Each structure stands twice: as C-alpha cells, then as structure tokens.
Amino acid sequence: MSNQSNESKFFDLHTTGIGYLNRIREVSPRKGKPFTCVTVAALHGATDKAEYSYIDCNVVGAEAESLVKRCQQAVEAKKKVLVSFRIGDIWADAFTYDKGDKKGQAGASLKGRLLFIGWIKVDGKLVYEAKPKNATPPTENQGQPGGDQTLNQEQPEQPVNQGQPVADQFGEQLDHDLGNDLPKEANQAA
C-alpha cells in the first residue's frame, strides 16, 4: 500500500578547511567504547595574518581514524602536521574553568566530528592525498597530444605506507618551509 521508506533523514552541517592537528588522544569513557579525539587548529582570515579556531573533534570513520593515528608520532615530535579536513555538526560547548587565572569564569569550546582528511603535509612535505571519489580509469589517449592534460598537473599522488606513521615514511627528507613563520601556539591547543 505504502511506498514510504523508514530511512531517517538528516541535515548535515559540514565545515571544510585546512588546519594543524594537535592533542591526538584516545578517550576511554566509563561506559562505552574508547574513541580517538584530536584538536584541529583551523586556519582562517588573511593568509599573511592567519588566525586559528580550535575545534575539539571525535574522529569518526575507519579511514579518518587510521590517518589521525598515523599522524600521532609526528604531532608528539612537535612537527607541523597540516591537513585538509571536513568536520561535521560543529557545536559550542559551555564550561566553567576549574583552575588557573580564569578559575570560576565561563568559557566555551568548539566541538565536532572529524569526518574526512583530504591530504596531510608534515613540515611542508605532502605525505598523503585522498583519491577522488569519482576517479575514472585512464583512457587510451590520456597523456598524449590532444588528450586531457589538465588533470594531475600538480603533484602526483604520494604513495602511502599503510602500516607506518607518516612521520617515519619520509625520514629526514621532510621539507621545513611550511609554517616556519607561524607562532608556536599554532601547533598547540588553546
């Protein structure tokens, strides 16, 4: 009689951008399964005077979790781990400071769910780039005169060793150009 589906429908609020990974950690609640969290120092504003918004994220999805865990060693070694990200359903969480100069004062932090990482750079060196979802197999004339040469003119996709942390994949070959003029607090959570 009825062709209606019982599927739930949702409105998605997605935030995309680039930012630095900080405070990668495993959280073990009293009830429930442990989960991975990370703080993303999202860049915004003018490129010559970038500002940061810190977003505490639960990492969701096996691929995103694997990538974040592989970056943990590099973050702990104080390397600059810059990522392209998609965070879902950001919300503000109100709290009261327990200690320090702001003890007793109200504060707020941004929270969200880290859904996707498009690419990862460690100290300026591209170590991971996600494959496009709509990737098409190469055609016979691709790469030849008259073929479509607009694709992949930038840097080719970097090989990723799935079992090795990103910090170890390239050893001492990391390029130290990116982010040297940024303040130290960019790579530390607020």
Image (spheres, rainbow, N blue to C red):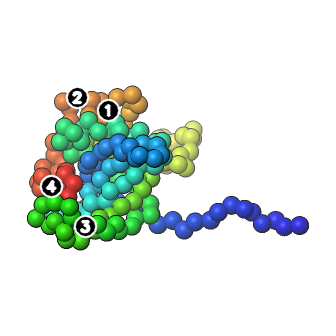
Q: What's under tag 1, amino acid-wise?
A: Pro
User: In this rendering, is residue 96 above or below 113?
Assistant: below
Q: Which mark is residue 165?
A: 1
Image quarter of residue 165:
top left
Q: Nearer the viewer, residue 41 or 131?
A: 41
Q: What's under tag 2, amino acid-wise?
A: Gly
Q: What residue is shown at x 20% (from left), y 58% (from top)?
A: 190
Q: Nearer the viewer, mark 2 or mark 1?
A: 1
Question: CB under 8 Å between callouts 1 and 4?
Answer: no
Q: Which residue is mark 3?
A: 96
User: In this rendering, is residue 39 above or below 12?
Assistant: above
Q: Which mark is residue 185?
A: 4
Q: Secondary structure at mark 3?
A: strand
Q: Secondary structure at mark 1?
A: loop
User: In this rendering, is residue 74 above or below 104?
Assistant: above
Question: Mark 2 packing: few (<14 Cα in 10 Å), some, or many (20+)?
Answer: few
Question: CB under 8 Å between callouts 2 and 4?
Answer: no
Q: Position of residue 35 (x, y in %)?
A: 41, 45
Q: What residue is shown at x 27% (from left), y 60% (from top)?
A: 54
Q: Secondary structure at mark 4?
A: helix
Q: Nearer the viewer, residue 142 or 37?
A: 37
Q: From where the camera sits, is residue 116 visible?
A: no
Question: Mark 1 packing: few (<14 Cα in 10 Å), some, or many (20+)?
Answer: some
Q: Nearer the viewer, mark 3 or mark 4?
A: 3
Q: Secondary structure at mark 2?
A: helix
Q: Which mark is residue 171?
A: 2
Q: From where the camera sits, is residue 80 visible?
A: yes
Which badge, 2 or 4, is on the more N-terminal residue? 2
Q: What's under tag 3, amino acid-wise?
A: Thr
Which badge, 3 or 2, is on the more N-terminal residue? 3
